Image (cartoon, grey):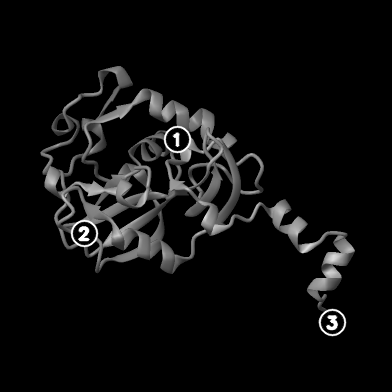
Amino acid sequence: MEWEISFEEYLERMQINPDDLRQQLRLPKISSIKKVIPLRNITKINFIVPLRKNFLEKIIKKITTLDKKWKPFETSEIKLIKAYPAQLKIGQKFVYRENYQKLLEEMPKIFDEFLINPGICDLGAFMIFGNDNQGNICLAYYIPSIIEKHEGELVIMDGIHRNFLVKQMGPTLNAILVDNVKTPFPCSFHSWDEIQVIPLKNKPKNIQERYFDLNSNLFRDLKYLGIDG
């Protein structure tokens, strides 16, 4: 049998008014957002919005190269896939031990107050509203690992530590596949057996030393739109 409840009746049954409901849901006012920051700098999450596919595509297509001369994904095809990390290629030379340990220890806590799966294998794309350590209302993103397709190879552009963890454990993870990229990948492609696990204190200061044959002009500037790559 079909049924419906008027919104006014719903509020009455819940014994709540529209302002209280808004407060319970912690719905943000766009005008109150002060800045876009990395998710790790959000001290308290207030509201999470799953990103619609077309808006996620808009974000990805606006990403520039580091020199701002190119938008590599402007005409690309973008879709969400289940990726097998062991089958992917890499452009980075190092995985930093503290980074993947932090993912294991802290990622599940971030979404404690919300009924979503916090595991890195299944998380989708979210826009996250919360407070920074000064109490400002801020916006942050969680975006699945981004994989580019070049010359028939799938190469990790963002999310090396998430992919490393999942590769070690065996399953798949959600990833964004970007095909028909109009600029070359900024590094040469290599297999996982060439990567080194090192502590952050040994991270090379020169970015050229962190990647295989890096062309820094083609480096994807994720921070341009506030993605914490």
Residue 138, position as x, y percentages in the image: 50, 46
Residue identifier under label 3:
1
Which of pointers 1 and 2 indicates the residue nearer the eye?
Answer: 2
Q: Nearer the viewer, residue 120 or 107?
A: 107
Question: Residue 169: which numbered mark, if any?
Answer: 1
Which of pointers 3 and 2 indicates the residue nearer the eye?
Answer: 2
Q: Secondary structure at mark 3?
A: loop
Residue 102, position as x, y percentages in the image: 46, 28
- Residue at image position (36%, 60%) is 59
Amino acid residing under circle 1: Met
Q: Earlier in the sequence, mark 3 or mark 1?
A: 3
Question: Residue 150: which numbered mark, if any?
Answer: none
Residue 90, position as x, y percentages in the image: 24, 41
Amino acid residing under circle 3: Met
Q: Earlier in the sequence, mark 1 or mark 2?
A: 2
Label 3 neighbour load within 10 Å: few <14, some 14-19, many 20+: few
Q: Nearer the viewer, residue 10 or 175?
A: 10
Distance between the Cα atoms at labels 3 and 2?
Answer: 52 Å
Distance between the Cα atoms at labels 1 and 2?
Answer: 32 Å
From where the camera sits, is residue 119 visible? yes
- Residue at image position (34%, 64%) is 78
Q: Is residue 204 above or below residue 80?
A: above
Q: Is residue 107 left or right of residue 100?
A: right
Distance between the Cα atoms at labels 3 and 1?
Answer: 47 Å
Residue identifier under label 2:
72
